[in-house]
Image (spheres, rainbow, N blue to C red):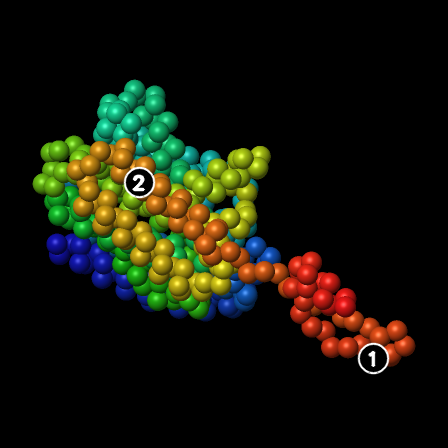
Amino acid sequence: MFDVLLSIAISFTITFLAIPAVINVAEMKKLFDMPDARKVHNAPITPLGELGIFAGFIFGCLLTVHFGQYPELQYFMAASFVIFFLGLKDDILIISPVKKFIGQVLAAFIIIYYGNIQIRSMHGFLGIYQVPEMFSLLLTYFAVIVVINSFNLIDGIDGLAGSLGLLSTTIFGAYFLYVGMLPYAVIAFALSGSLLAFLIFNFQPAKIFMGDTGSLLVGTINAILVLKFINIAGSGDVRFPIPATPAVGFTILMIPLLDTLRVFGIRILHRRSPFSPDRNHIHHLLLDRGFSHRMITLTLVAVNAVMIGLVFMARSVNCTILLFGVFAVFFAMIAGIYYLMPAPRLFVAKTAKEENAQLTKASHLVPLTKDSMLEQNN
């Protein structure tokens, strides 16, 4: 328990002290994320919050984790370094989606092959338990890459990715601490401490963004934690086994995972790359309906937390039923946003001129509807 508290204290302190320094250096060197038509911020803001998050997380782990007891943890740190330099280069120089994907596959290879984490059982989902080796590897690679990208893609407004990451790592850390897997609890809480300090500067109005490195790092650690959680909680050999462990693990990451899968599906249906940018994410839908960054973040985190509680209480129910229930709730929420909260109607400014007048009348707003246009012409 002392190691957990120490990891939180170290990671929080280092990140909290590092972020202001990063902001100052970014202002001197003009390292900003400039606003454009697709982005939601209106002023230049540095995306280098990743430096503070990574520093706090790494020091929190290295100073408290006993790598001799769990040798695979050193490979998790190696995968984190791969993701760190991949995201840092993308934030500063911009790299192609193909190169970014190759880097993520390399990190997944380290986690799976050297870290020895693999999905070997579906735990009753769709009636499937043990799976063939080749399918197991493909499923694990897919799961790792999707989780990594899910936090990268959900990082679109102030505080959202950090808050969801804080929620998931805290829950995973509490479970691993309870079942006696202290090193994994330390990893989870070290990232929690860093994210908590980062959110002080990232909640609306944000002074700094976590950047690709930060969001990819959060996704990488959550991928490791959720796979380990599914394997451990579903084995029955721990202090607190969970029968429907895939459903619980999936629900802990519900908002980023389902939103990513939904957006990937939309892009593929439109014959576009799954990694091509757009404004179809759930936070974009809510922004277009007048919600503030703070309200969107608090609402989505609250929805995720409530769903975690409900699925956890129903953990003895069939895994397939629980997962389809989670899907149904999420897509019902998306349907509600589309149909119960329609986007504001468009307005344009029209200027009318008198035939013989030198001055124009004042511009005024006219709704784009047929009836209103007829009234205006009359």
Query: Left of 188 or right of it: where is 217?
Result: right
Query: Label 1 amino acid?
Result: Leu
Above or below residue 269? Residue 150 is: below
Question: 267 and 199: which one is in front?
Answer: 267
Q: Secondary structure at mark 2?
A: helix
Q: Secondary structure at mark 1?
A: loop
Say which residue label 1 marks: 359
Question: 232 and 46: which one is in front?
Answer: 232
Q: Residues within 10 Å of mark 2 (few under 14, many from 20)?
A: few
Query: Left of 132 or right of it: where is 372?
Result: right
Above or below residue 163? Residue 221 is: above
Say which residue label 2 marks: 325
Q: Is residue 152 visible?
A: no
Q: Residue at x 45, y 41 (%)?
A: 262
Q: Quadrant of the C terminus?
A: bottom right
Q: Quadrant of the N terminus?
A: bottom left
Above or below residue 233? Residue 350 is: below
Q: Residue at x 42, y 57 (%)?
A: 210
Query: Label 2 amino acid?
Result: Gly
Above or below residue 26? Residue 73 is: above
Q: Residues within 10 Å of mark 1 (few under 14, many from 20)?
A: few
Question: 92 and 276: which one is in front?
Answer: 276
Q: Are the residues flagged by discs 1 and 2 in contact, CB closer than 8 Å?
A: no
Instruction: Tell me where residue 67 sits by quadrant.
Output: top left
Q: Residue at x 11, y 38 (%)?
A: 238
